Image: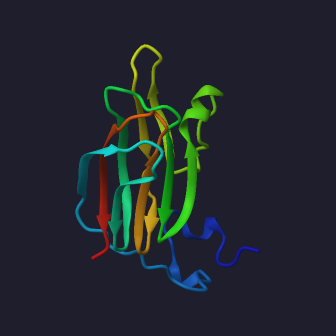
Amino acid sequence: MAHGAPDWWSRGHMDIILQTLQYLIIKPYYGDSKVLSSCTSVPDTTWTQLFKIEGKGRIYGGIIRSGAEEPTHPAFRVYLDGDEAGWFDLGEMLKAKLFPPASSFLRVLCKQAAVPFFVVDLLPNIQFEDSLEVQFWHDSGANRTICYEIYYGLAT
């Protein structure tokens, strides 16, 4: 049940004395945006770490894309604070025309049959206490290049 004064008493401004608060949340300051950008050669049938960000922080956004040759059966694993938070078989989702839900960590931005590549969006506002790690896997029969550009901030 709601506590405090009815909305019509405050006439557009908040009166903190009339409110009943159990606790007050203080959000950390994440500082300036940092960029993590690189390309990685991923061997066949091996989970390979694309990137790992250590410290308390927040993701502001980013993209992960394949190189000129699209890998077959691409899959991603996302680890938050050392625990697996999600596993995404991009190849199966694209075949079935299924996309990760909006509450997911990844979203498909571009996939065309005529052009052999994909672009995946790392959604903003992912918060982590110790670390964030993204790994990639494929079974193309040869090494594939995966590039990423991630924008993030660390708590100060």
Residue drawn at the location 62% of the way across and 83% of the way down: 20
- Judging depth in this view, the residue of 33 and 119 nearest the camera is 119
Relative to 112, say whether 6 is above or below.
Answer: below
Quarter of the image where one finds residue 30: bottom left
Residue 96 appears at what percent x and percent y?
Answer: 66, 28
Quarter of the image where one finds residue 28: bottom left
- Judging depth in this view, the residue of 141 and 78 nearest the camera is 141
Residue 37 appears at what percent x and percent y?
Answer: 24, 49
Q: Residue furthest right?
A: 1
Relative to 24, say whether 122 is above or below.
Answer: above
Quarter of the image where one finds residue 90: top right
- Judging depth in this view, the residue of 76 and 54 nearest the camera is 76
Q: Quadrant of the C terminus?
A: bottom left
Relative to 146, say whether 97 is above or below.
Answer: above
**Colour scheme:** rainbow
Residue 21 appears at what percent x and percent y?
Answer: 59, 83
Is 124 left or right of 54, judged from the image as shown? Answer: right
Q: Quadrant of the N terminus?
A: bottom right
Residue drawn at the location 30% of the way across and 69% of the way down: 154
Relative to 4, say whether 115 is above or below.
Answer: above
Residue 80 appears at what percent x and percent y?
Answer: 48, 66
Residue drawn at the location 40% of the way across and 69% of the way down: 131
